[in-house]
Image (tube, rainbow, N blue to C red):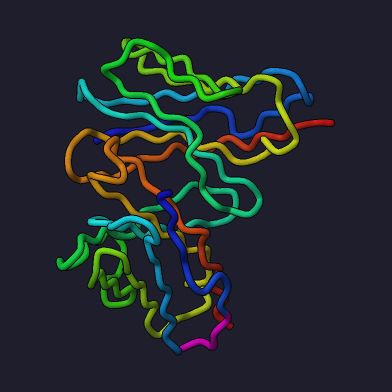
């Protein structure tokens, strides 16, 4: 149980284009989803927290107009990187949590998406 | 705000031996949860073990166990009978019992298992 999928696993795009990454909880309803960014050999950096049906809460320093997050249902959250530039190239990871599925506030993670902006 | 510190950027262990990864944290809360997550080369984050702060008994999951010292704010992970598949980055994480459900991660320890 508690499986989170992420799509695509790897995406290459041209500078200036937008890219959408999907995060789905497959066997549970996720009231809260998180989006992280991870650079090689570093820890996860929280970008934003989204609760179903509400606007996402962004961490300090994260441009909300650049990283659009939508959590329209209890099983799906999307991250859209708008007008992507090479410096946005990174590994993006989503996670999901829910009082029923994760009573100890643990998060279940997707497999990540490698974004390369040319 | 909570902080989590992992002071060992890299560790290595011989296959079948035991290794301990260190983690300290700082919080003013009395009730919280602590986790160890594993991130193998595939980069999929996997929950290894969980500890509830109100429990004095150390958590154990097969070859993985923790040494939870609440007063010292220490939460180390012991891996017994190390296997090649244990090679990964290990992250210690803290979360409060509130509804925010956010995790605070340490910087990670890269574990190498030597055959």
The spot of residue B61 in percent (x, y) is 52, 25
For the residue pair B47 and A118, the one nearer the viewer reads as B47
Q: How many marks?
A: 0
The spot of residue B78 in percent (x, y) is 57, 20
| Rendered residue at 40%/67% (across/down) | A23
Q: Is residue A72 left or right of residue B80?
A: left
Residue A60 seen: no
Is B75 located above or below residue A78 in the figure?
Answer: above
The spot of residue B7 in percent (x, y) is 53, 27
Q: Which contiguous range is marked in magenta?
A: A12-16
Residue found farthest to the left: A54
Residue A14 shown in magenta? yes
The spot of residue A51 in percent (x, y) is 20, 60
Q: Is residue B29 left or right of residue B80?
A: left
| Rendered residue at 34%/34% (across/down) | B94
Is B97 located above or below residue A90 in the figure?
Answer: above
The C terminus of chain A is located in which quarter?
bottom right
For the residue pair A33 and B70, the one nearer the viewer reads as A33
Residue A28 shown in magenta? no
Query: Which quadrant would residue A58 be assigned to in this image?
Result: bottom left
Q: Is residue A31 left or right of residue A87?
A: left
Residue B25 seen: yes
């Amino acid at each position: 149980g508690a499986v989170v999928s992420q799509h695509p696993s790897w995406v290459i795009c041209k500078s200036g284009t937008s890219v959408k990454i999907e995060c789905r909880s497959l066997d549970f309803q996720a009231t809260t989803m998180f989006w992280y960014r991870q650079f090689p050999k570093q820890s996860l950096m929280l970008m934003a927290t989204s609760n179903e049906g509400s606007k996402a809460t962004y961490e300090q320093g994260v441009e909300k107009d650049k990283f659009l997050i939508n959590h329209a249902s209890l099983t799906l959250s999307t991250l859209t990187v708008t007008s992507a530039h090479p410096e946005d190239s990174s590994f993006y990871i989503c996670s999901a949590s829910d009082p029923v599925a994760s009573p100890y506030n643990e998060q279940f993670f997707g497999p990540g998406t490698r974004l390369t902006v040319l | 705000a909570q902080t989590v510190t992992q002071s060992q950027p890299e560790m290595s262990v011989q296959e079948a031996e035991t290794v301990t990864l260190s983690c300290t944290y700082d919080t003013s809360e009395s009730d919280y949860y602590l986790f160890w997550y594993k991130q193998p080369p595939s980069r999929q984050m996997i929950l290894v073990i969980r500890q509830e702060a109100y429990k004095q008994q150390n958590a154990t999951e097969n070859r993985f166990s923790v040494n939870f010292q609440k007063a010292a704010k220490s939460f180390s992970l012991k891996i017994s009978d190390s296997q090649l598949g244990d090679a990964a980055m290990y992250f210690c994480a803290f979360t409060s019992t509130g509804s925010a459900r956010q995790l605070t991660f340490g910087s990670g320890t890269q574990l190498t298992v030597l055959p």
